[in-house]
């Protein structure tokens, strides 16, 4: 099964991602994903177990780097 996760990390200032945003992006990259960073969210796609594991690491990294909110949506694709 495949999955697509889209997340935002706040606070977010367009063009000036803070350390909490970069920590989130770095966490999914460390998990082997190359995130598609867009103006309204960041997306990763892949095997469902790997995506859920990467998003768990992303949430922890963002939290410890000062995030005030992480919004996450995961779509599972069979």
Image: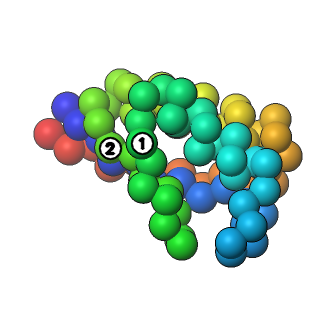
Relative depth, front residue between 56 and 12: 12
71 to 55, vertically: above or below: below
Residue occupying image coordinates x 20% and y 44%: 77
What is the x, y in percent for residue 10? 73, 60
Left or right: residue 59 compared with residue 43 = right
Task: Work out whether mark 1 precedes mark 2 in sequence or the reverse, and give the earlier one.
Answer: 1
Residue 56 makes an appearance in the image: no
Q: Which residue sits furthest left?
A: 78
Residue topped by disc 2? 45
30 to 42, vertically: above or below: above
Mark 1 lies on a secondary structure that is loop
Quadrant housing residue 65: top right
Nearer to us: label 1 or label 2 = 1
Residue occupying image coordinates x 60% and y 58%: 8
Instruction: Assess disc 2: are there few (<14), some (14-19) or many (≥20) residues with their C-alpha within 10 Å of its C-alpha.
Output: some
Residue 36 makes an appearance in the image: yes
Left or right: residue 6 compared with residue 61 = left
Q: Which mark is residue 34?
A: 1
Q: CA distance from mark 1 to mark 2?
A: 9 Å
Residue occupying image coordinates x 69% and y 52%: 21
26 to 19, vertically: above or below: above
Left or right: residue 63 compared with residue 42 = right
| Picture mark count | 2
Quarter of the rendering occupied by the N terminus: top left
Mark 2 lies on a secondary structure that is strand
């Amino acid at each position: 099964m495949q999955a697509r996760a889209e997340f935002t990390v706040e606070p977010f200032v367009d063009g000036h991602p803070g350390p909490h945003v970069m920590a989130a992006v770095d966490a999914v990259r460390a998990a082997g994903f190359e995130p598609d960073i867009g103006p309204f969210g960041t997306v990763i796609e892949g095997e469902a177990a790997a995506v859920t594991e990467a998003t768990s690491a992303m949430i922890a990294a963002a939290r410890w780097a000062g995030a005030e909110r992480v919004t996450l949506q995961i779509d599972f694709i069979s």
